[in-house]
Image: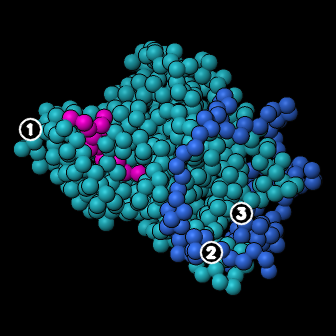
Chain colours: A blue, B cyan
């Protein structure tokens, strides 16, 4: 774990970090957005650093709130979308396939 | 309820006079012309929409076609249990063949090829969907001002200078304004049913996490999202809740059917009520505190014991835990919206996938969506994940335990729903994003704990409604509804607006 991970309050959000996060999120921000989100993120994370003061030693995380038993559905074949239906919501299609952007530069 | 006249005397059946049950009985008995009723309701819905911007889509043709079919079924005595009941649906719940965008621009043009399970169950019982209601895009907001690019902000029908609340603003506004019999399907992640219900003066009911299937709900944060119900009064929640609840194999988190919990369904005497001491913090308006004190007295008159209790962990850490978890989940859920296969698209020619996805997402997500994606991506990044996301998930465990402990002693918990009445748009404009998030201080707790809760109107301040939030232990919907009816009866006079 990095030092930042143990002390969130110490995290310094810079415009460069905001742009790095945006890039990972596939977002191109304007200069104004970079400025605004850098300021907002810093303010929000400073407030959330209150979590540093909570003792969670030995506490298991809850990834959802209600205890469930494992539920398996029967393994049976059922109707799914036809190829025509699946393609019906886009203009970018050809010969029964979706057209997408190129994946190799 | 007033005596209902025969069909030939009914120009309109007003929701002010008739409950859902009254209406359903009349339809079943053939005393209401469903087609005519739907036509009139659609005209009114269009009027409300022009004035207050409650809808993203009104599906008139579909509704009228359904009405004609139901009219025939009524004639042949084959109509379902909700025959002719008009339902508006929050835009993030998929309705087959009706544009469903979660209030966003990036999903403009998306018309689902399937119904959400809740819709499927309603339509199987012959309810009629009239349209999709306005919301903050993807549910990201408490005031419904974060609408998708190009969408209109809904206005509070009690005072158009004020917010409806969010994110289910269109649903709450429509429920408050509609003078025809109608129920709204809404959705809460951290308070999106309760806040707008409080600001618009209607009942907003949010069940235990998993009680209503999320299949077909456009996700904000899967571990928190719950479909809920809004109506003018408590008894109108029941017929809809009964139909849409229950196990669904299409949702891995749907609760198993309730046979194992039947014991809890027995009607019990409600004796002990805990009132959260955070209700009297300095950030809660004095008028709301005073309304709560009055309710306490009325409950005591009705034989309940009311004591102040505290949830120190929830009060201190709830907002941070909620926003870290919800934005982390949202940032992954929104990764699927990239301009391919459905929704907004542009030409892909000559573009790499990275260029194309970045272009579509940057042009079509609104500011708050970008802010939450960035926050959520950050808290999941290597080096930060344990300190934020994992810590928040552990905080959530402590919050759940804290509620459970109180429910060992108290039947129900109460607090105001919101710390203030619906603010004006001018007041909202002065808040920073963090101050927006802090407005959810009273609603994030029950949402993190997955417990059933509801907002119910208990009077007015500044001529605007005040909401009381009532919380029950997980799977205790019956007890919650029983108590809400008691509150409704106790505050009947307070809810008559000056």
Residue B186 in the image, given as x and y percentages of width and height: 45, 47
The residue tagged with tag 3: helix, strand or loop? helix
Asked if B29 appears above or below B325 in the picture, the reply is: above
Q: In the rendered structure, find residue B6 and report the number of the disc placed on it.
A: 1
Q: Tell me the magenta residue range.
A: B77-90
- Residue B75 quadrant: top left
The residue tagged with tag 2: helix, strand or loop? loop
Residue B167 in the image, given as x and y percentages of width and height: 50, 54
Q: Where is the C terminus of chain B found, in terms of image quarters? A: top left
In this rendering, which labeled residue sits more in front, label 3 or label 2? Answer: 2
Q: In the rendered structure, find residue B404 and report the number of the disc placed on it.
A: none
Instruction: Please give the residue where the numbered disc 2 appears in the rendered image.
Output: A99
Would residue B108 appear left or right of B328 to someone viewing this image? left
* Mark 3 Cα-neighbour bin, 10 Å: few <14, some 14–19, many ≥20: many
* Residue A46 in sight in this render: no
In this rendering, which labeled residue sits more in front, label 3 or label 1? Answer: 1
The residue lying toward the viewer, choosing from B419 and B457, is B457
* Mark 1 Cα-neighbour bin, 10 Å: few <14, some 14–19, many ≥20: few
Q: Where is the N terminus of chain B found, in terms of image quarters? A: top left
Disc 1: which chain? B
Q: In the rendered structure, find residue B374 and report the number of the disc placed on it.
A: 3
Residue B23 in the image, given as x and y percentages of width and height: 23, 38
Residue B81 in magenta stretch = yes
Residue A84 in the image, given as x and y percentages of width and height: 51, 65
The residue tagged with tag 1: helix, strand or loop? loop
Query: In the rendered structure, which disc, 3 or 1, sits on the residue that comes first in sequence?
Result: 1
Residue B390 in magenta stretch = no
Identify the residue at horizontal 39%, vertical 18% (top origin): B302
């Amino acid at each position: 774990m990095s030092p930042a991970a143990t002390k969130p309050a110490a995290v310094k959000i810079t415009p460069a970090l905001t742009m790095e996060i945006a890039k990972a999120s596939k977002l191109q921000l304007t200069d104004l957005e970079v400025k605004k989100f850098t300021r907002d993120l810093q303010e929000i994370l400073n407030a959330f650093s209150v979590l540093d003061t909570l003792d969670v030693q030995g506490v298991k995380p809850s990834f959802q709130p209600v205890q469930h038993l494992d539920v398996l559905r029967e393994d049976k074949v059922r109707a799914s979308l036809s190829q025509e239906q699946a393609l019906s919501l886009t203009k970018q299609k050809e010969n029964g396939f979706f057209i997408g952007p190129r994946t190799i530069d | 309820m007033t005596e209902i006249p025969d069909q030939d005397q009914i120009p309109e059946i007003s929701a002010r006079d008739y409950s859902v049950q009254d209406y359903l009985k009349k339809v079943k008995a053939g005393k209401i012309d469903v087609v005519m009723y739907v036509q009139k309701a659609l005209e009114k819905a269009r009027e409300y929409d022009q004035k207050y911007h409650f809808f993203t889509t009104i599906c008139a043709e579909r509704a009228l076609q359904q009405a004609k079919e139901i009219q025939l079924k009524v004639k042949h005595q084959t109509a379902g249990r909700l025959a002719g009941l008009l339902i508006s649906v929050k835009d993030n719940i998929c309705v087959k063949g009706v544009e469903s965008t979660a209030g966003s621009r990036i999903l403009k043009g998306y018309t689902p090829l399937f119904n959400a399970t809740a819709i499927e169950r309603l339509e199987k019982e012959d309810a009629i969907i009239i349209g999709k209601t306005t919301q903050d895009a993807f549910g990201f907001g408490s005031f419904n001002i974060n609408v998708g690019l190009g969408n209109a902000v809904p206005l509070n029908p009690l005072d158009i200078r004020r917010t409806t609340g969010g994110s289910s603003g269109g649903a709450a506004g429509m429920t408050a304004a509609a003078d025809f019999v109608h129920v709204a399907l809404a959705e809460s992640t951290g308070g999106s049913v309760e806040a707008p219900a409080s600001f618009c003066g209607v009942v907003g009911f949010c069940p235990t996490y998993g009680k209503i299937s999320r299949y077909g709900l456009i996700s904000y944060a899967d571990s928190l999202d719950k479909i809920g119900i809004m109506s003018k009064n408590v008894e109108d929640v029941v017929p809809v809740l009964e139909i849409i609840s229950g196990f669904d194999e299409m949702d891995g988190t749907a609760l198993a059917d309730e046979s194992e919990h039947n014991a809890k369904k027995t009607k019990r005497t409600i004796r002990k009520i805990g009132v959260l001491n955070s209700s009297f913090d300095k950030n809660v308006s004095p008028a709301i505190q005073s309304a709560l004190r009055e309710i306490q007295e009325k409950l005591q008159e009705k034989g309940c014991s009311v004591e102040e209790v505290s949830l120190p962990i929830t009060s201190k850490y709830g907002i941070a835990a909620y926003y870290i978890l919800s934005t982390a989940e949202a940032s992954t859920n929104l990764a699927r919206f990239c301009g391919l296969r459905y929704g907004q698209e542009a030409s892909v020619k000559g573009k790499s996938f990275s260029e194309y996805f970045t272009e579509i997402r940057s042009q079509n997500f609104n500011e708050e969506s970008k802010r939450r994606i960035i926050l959520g991506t950050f808290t999941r990044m290597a080096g930060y994940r344990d300190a934020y996301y994992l810590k928040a998930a552990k905080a959530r465990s402590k919050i759940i335990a804290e509620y459970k402990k109180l429910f060992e002693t108290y039947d129900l918990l109460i607090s105001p729903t919101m710390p203030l009445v619906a603010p004006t748009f001018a007041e909202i404009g002065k808040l920073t994003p963090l101050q927006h998030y802090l407005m959810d201080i009273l609603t994030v707790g029950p949402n993190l704990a997955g417990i059933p809760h509801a907002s119910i109107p208990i009077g007015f301040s500044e001529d605007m409604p005040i909401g009381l939030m009532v919380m029950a232990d997980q799977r205790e919907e019956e007890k919650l509804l029983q108590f809400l009816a008691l509150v409704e009866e106790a505050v009947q006079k307070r809810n008559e607006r000056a």
